[in-house]
């Protein structure tokens, strides 16, 4: 290949990425105009502008991603889109969630709002801006000193597949053997490793790094991992692998397929109405499937929960702005700020329960729901506390600005460690499986990242030791080649 052909080959992906950025930007502008002009009566012009500004800032990482030439996982774009869908779009989705609003009534009438909260919309905008600005400032200018951990990849990726296969067996054993799941601390590794293995196999297959029997092994493992997720009927556990698929397709530049799958995922959100009914059903997969089909049949025949349809319930579930408005309304006039109370588990999360059997359990979700009178005092359930809202319940307005900026810096640190350009396929798959679950920032910070450091360390130690063992067994390392 001559120099001209090489240059042309490099320019083609860049041209496609710029075209995607232009298309995405143009579509966002048109959609923003339509949303503003058709906004609900409850939303004032100022409120609509603030919400659209949040959407615009949340979309920036996606536009920046498409303009870059290097191949990385679309991690931070997904973080920005979470802010768009769960906060920025909430005011415009009111007709889908509460057709007769105001008032907005939720959680059995415990949350009632009769007007928009400009303060809340401003806090959402400022927090999103702090998150995005801090991420790019730290990622581009503050982490040059940070070394990137690397893993050897075996010839043809075959040894990597054997190591991934071992993790697959361990994960499935944890899911289906009750005795193993009761071992203290083991779930902190074997539960999230399912996403890692799924993503790594997926990337290896999409990039055609497997051959023959190893392709069969990878496909079989993927099917078993999917079946393990389906068996739970846990909507979040089903959606995260789907998001990993979308991210992997974007990484491999399969934009059209990724776009179609993303649209299908959005259209499938109302299924949450039915999975939420059956996920705690005892009796295994068959019983859950039976209950699921009964719920779907009843719904078709007009049996509805609280006289609301599936679309209304799922839009209420993802519209975090109104939960935020409720919190702002209550704090600090009626409920004092927590002063960092919800972040205290971070200091003990890394201590295995096997070493400290009496370690306090993570109960922030339940305490949050009861404190803000959204759960009954005797309730055994919990209420999700998204990161953005968590910064406010602890420290108020300064907490949103500083807290979201710190979160942006933290995500930049993770992005540098696990998503640097030029990583090999195994490393990309590992990064994908670790990072994508963090884009759905729906639970409090310590619950989602408290055990992340030891999980990453254990994962890399496993592959390093596994590589050494395989080499001792005669499977020589792949020739070192620079990516």
Image: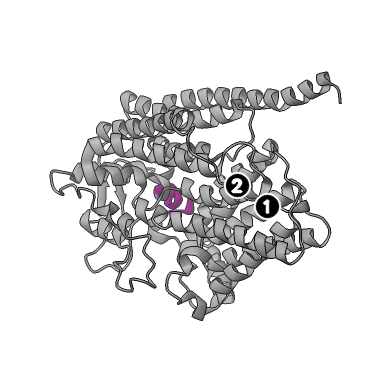
The residue shown at (43%, 28%) is 137
Image quadrant of residue 27? top right
Q: Quadrant of the C terminus?
A: top right
Foreground of the two, 262 or 75: 75
Residue 315 placed where, x, y %?
44, 47
Q: Secondary structure at mark 1?
A: helix
Q: Which mark is residue 202?
A: 1
The residue shown at (66%, 59%) is 467
The dominant secondary structure in magenta is helix
Query: Magenta stretch: residue 313 in it?
Result: yes
Q: Which residue is mark 2?
A: 150
Q: Which residues are magenta?
A: 308-316
Foreground of the two, 210 or 91: 210
For residue 227, say whether it is visible. no
Q: CA distance from mark 2 to mark 1?
A: 19 Å
The relative height of residue 138 versus residue 243 in the rendered view (above or below) is above
Q: Secondary structure at mark 2?
A: loop
Q: Give the number of the mark in front: 2 or 1.
A: 2
Image marks 2 and 1: residues in contact by CB distance under 8 Å: no
Q: Residue furthest top?
A: 4
Residue 295 placed where, x, y %?
51, 66
For residue 404, say whether it is visible. yes
Please give left or right for residue 345 compared with residue 39 in the image: left
Instruction: Say which label, 2 or 1, has the lower sequence index.
Output: 2
Q: Which mark is residue 268?
A: none
The residue shown at (64%, 37%) is 422
The residue shown at (27%, 31%) is 118
């Amino acid at each position: 290949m001559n120099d001209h052909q090489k240059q042309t080959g490099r320019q083609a992906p860049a041209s496609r990425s710029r075209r995607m950025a232009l298309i995405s930007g143009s579509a966002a502008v048109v959609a923003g105009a339509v949303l503003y002009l058709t906004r609900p009566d409850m939303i004032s012009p100022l409120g609509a502008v603030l919400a659209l500004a949040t959407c615009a800032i949340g979309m920036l990482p996606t536009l920046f991603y498409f303009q870059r030439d290097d191949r990385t996982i679309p991690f931070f774009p997904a973080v920005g889109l979470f802010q768009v869908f769960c906060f920025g779009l909430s005011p415009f989705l009111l007709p889908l969630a509460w057709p007769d609003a105001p008032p907005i009534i939720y959680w059995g009438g415990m949350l009632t709002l009769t007007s928009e909260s400009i303060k809340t919309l401003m806090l959402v905008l400022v927090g999103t801006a702090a998150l995005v600005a801090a991420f790019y400032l730290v990622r581009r200018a503050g982490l040059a000193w940070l070394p990137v951990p690397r893993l050897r990849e075996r010839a043809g990726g075959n040894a990597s597949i054997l190591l991934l296969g071992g993790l697959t067996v361990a994960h499935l054993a944890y899911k289906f053997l009750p005795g193993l799941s009761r071992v203290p601390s083991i779930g902190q590794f074997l539960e999230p490793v399912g996403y890692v293995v799924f993503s790594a196999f997926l990337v290896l297959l999409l990039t055609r790094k497997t051959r023959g029997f190893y392709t069969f092994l990878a496909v079989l493992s993927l099917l078993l991992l999917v079946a393990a997720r389906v068996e739970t009927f846990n909507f979040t556990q089903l959606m995260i692998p789907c998001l990993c698929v979308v991210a992997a397709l974007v990484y491999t530049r399969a934009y059209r397929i990724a776009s179609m799958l993303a649209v299908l995922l959005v259209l499938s959100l109302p299924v949450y109405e039915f999975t939420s009914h059956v996920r705690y059903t005892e009796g295994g997969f068959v019983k859950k499937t039976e209950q699921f089909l009964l719920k779907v049949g009843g719904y078709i025949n007009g049996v509805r929960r609280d006289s609301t349809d599936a679309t209304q319930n799922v839009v209420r579930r993802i519209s975090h702005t109104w939960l935020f408005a409720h919190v702002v309304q209550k704090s600090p006039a009626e409920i004092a700020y927590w002063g960092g109370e919800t972040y205290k588990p971070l200091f003990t999360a890394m201590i295995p329960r096997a070493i400290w059997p009496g370690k306090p359990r993570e109960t922030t979700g339940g305490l949050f729901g009861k404190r803000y009178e959204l759960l009954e005092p005797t309730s055994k359930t919990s209420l999700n506390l998204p990161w953005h809202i968590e910064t406010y319940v602890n420290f108020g307005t300064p907490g949103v600005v500083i807290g979201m900026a710190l979160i942006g810096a933290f995500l930049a640190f993770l992005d540098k460690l696990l998503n640097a350009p030029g990583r090999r396929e195994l490393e990309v798959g590992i990064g994908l499986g670790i990072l994508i679950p963090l884009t759905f920032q729906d639970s409090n910070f310590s619950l989602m990242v408290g055990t992340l450091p030891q999980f990453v360390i254990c994962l890399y130690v496993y592959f390093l030791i596994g590589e050494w063992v395989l080499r001792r067994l005669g499977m020589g390392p792949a020739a070192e080649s620079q990516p």
